[in-house]
Amino acid sequence: MKRIFTLVAIVATACLTAANAYAMGEIVQAAAAVPAMLPAALVAGAFALANPLAARPRAVTAAPRADASDPKKMLADLTKAFEDFKAANDEKLKAKTDDVVVNEKVERINTAVGDLQTNFQKAIDDLNAKLAAADIGSGVIGDIPADPEYVDAFKAHMRKGDVKSAMTKGVAEDGGYLAPVEWDRTITGKLKLVSPIRANARVISITGAGFKKLFTDRAIGSGWVGETAARPATSTPQIGQLDFPLGEIYANPAISQQLLDDSAINLEEWLGAEVDTEFARQEGIAFLSGDGVNKPHGVLTYVTGAANAARHPWGAIEVINSGSAAALTSDGFIDLFYSIPAVYRQNAKLFTGRLAQASMRKLKDGQGNYLWQPSFAAGQPATLAGESIVEIPDMPNVAANAIAALYGDMEATYLVVDRVGIRVLRDPFTNKPFVHFYTTKRVGGGVYNPEPMRALKIAVNP
């Protein structure tokens, strides 16, 4: 019965369409269309009969049932009425005169077809209403159970356009898991400026607990004498000693063992590189301004008037004033460049900060030429009056009484003392479940010869 009803609905729809065409006056065209429409309808009906579960909505929970009329009889009556209508109307068209009887017959059959159409359409509408409400039958189609959740979602969609079952990537459970975001398997670190003092200084490695340097003042006396003149004793040079103690820098980061096992990035290698960079930054600061307490002695602390001015046997690094109380001047740099012995000028460089270079770019000579010149070759530094510039990130800025620049041979001035280098102790035991990477480096530093270096102080000339 279910399959017959489906066939009835399809064929009846085709027939009713043609009947409407006749009712509108398009009689001949509708008659010609019927033979082409019925086979397609029958094929569709046959397909529905052969596939009783195909294309059925999930919300349908029972098979449709006929009302008081028999579906077979409804189809037969509708088909017969339509055929009678065609025959009567063809007879009317062929008649040469207006026959009242034929006209009445055509109208009577047309009315019957209309009534059948109305009744059948009402049956279809009732069925659609029941299907939409899921309110008919026993609650199953064959062995497919009812799905109230789907029915509720269907109602919501028909009323408001909501589709709760739609897949979207915005919600993980609705399909977002299937649209993963690509991620970078490298780590970009925040900028850390590392001082280039180590690269320009003298570096030695030791195997003991510290390093001591011996110095002599070369204060040996001499004199001219005659052939028989007396030869009194002359002065003897003095020997001094300078200690370069080692400071220790350490880091002790921790990573859980599971993260080390599961991470897509080699965390040990990455962490080692981060520690290297941090050590380089910290020791660079100490090489410039360290106070010597558990760290190197900074080169700026050996300048005249600074904390370690008297530490070296040969005295402090000499200071040259800029010639202005709060600014750099061209004359001040000329005095600076020519203040060191000529033997050290060959490898001399100008060590200064970035903001100080901004002031240097504005300086001109007596002919109006700029002293600062950019580099025109890769790997070559900018120059000021022909002297190479080395940028030191932590150098003081231009301000009254500040040491804004150093000029000289850093390799002949500053000594970096390394003990072994960086040592890493992998410790998975102390703080389970974390693995600590206890990293240490012992390094010292200080001025071993103040003569090849001069400091530029922002101050007026005495």
Image (tube, rainbow, N blue to C red):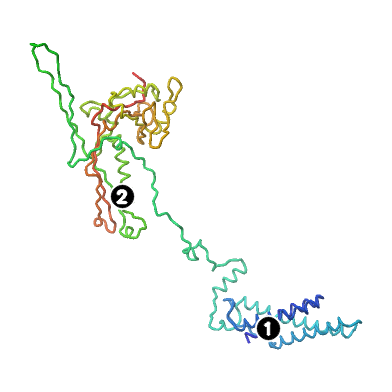
Q: Is residue 68 left or right of residue 335?
A: right
For disc 1, the neighbor class at 10 Å (few under 14, some 14 to 19, many from 20) is many
Rendered-image quadrant of the C terminus: top left
Residue 123 picture location, percent across and down: 69, 81
Q: In this view, does 116 lie to the left or right of 220?
A: right
Residue at the image position 62 percent from the left and 81 percent from the top: 47
Looking at the picture, how far across and down is residue 71, in whole percent?
Answer: 68, 86
Secondary structure type for disc 2: helix
Measured as percent of width and height from the top left, residue 353 is found at 37, 33
* Residue ID at (28%, 56%): 435
Q: In which quarter of the image is residue 391?
A: top left
Q: Which mark is residue 272?
A: 2
Q: Cβ–Cβ below 8 Å for labels 1 and 2?
A: no
Q: How many marks?
A: 2
Q: How far apart are marks 1 and 2 (CA)?
A: 80 Å
Residue located 28% across and 49% down the image: 252
Of 291 and 68, nearer the camera is 291
Residue 319: numbered disc: none
In this picture, is 356 found above or below 251?
above
Q: In the current view of this chain or complex, which residue is farthest to the right?
A: 97
Quick one: label 1 or label 2, which is nearer the N terminus? 1
Vertical comparison of 262 with 191: above or below: below
Give the x, y percent position of residue 120.
71, 81
In the picture, measured across the screen, residue 183 lies left or right of residue 344, that is: right
Q: What residue type is labelled 2?
A: Gly
Q: What residue type is labelled 1?
A: Val
Q: What element carries label 1?
A: helix
Q: Quadrant of the N terminus?
A: bottom right
Per the image, the residue denoted by label 1 is 8
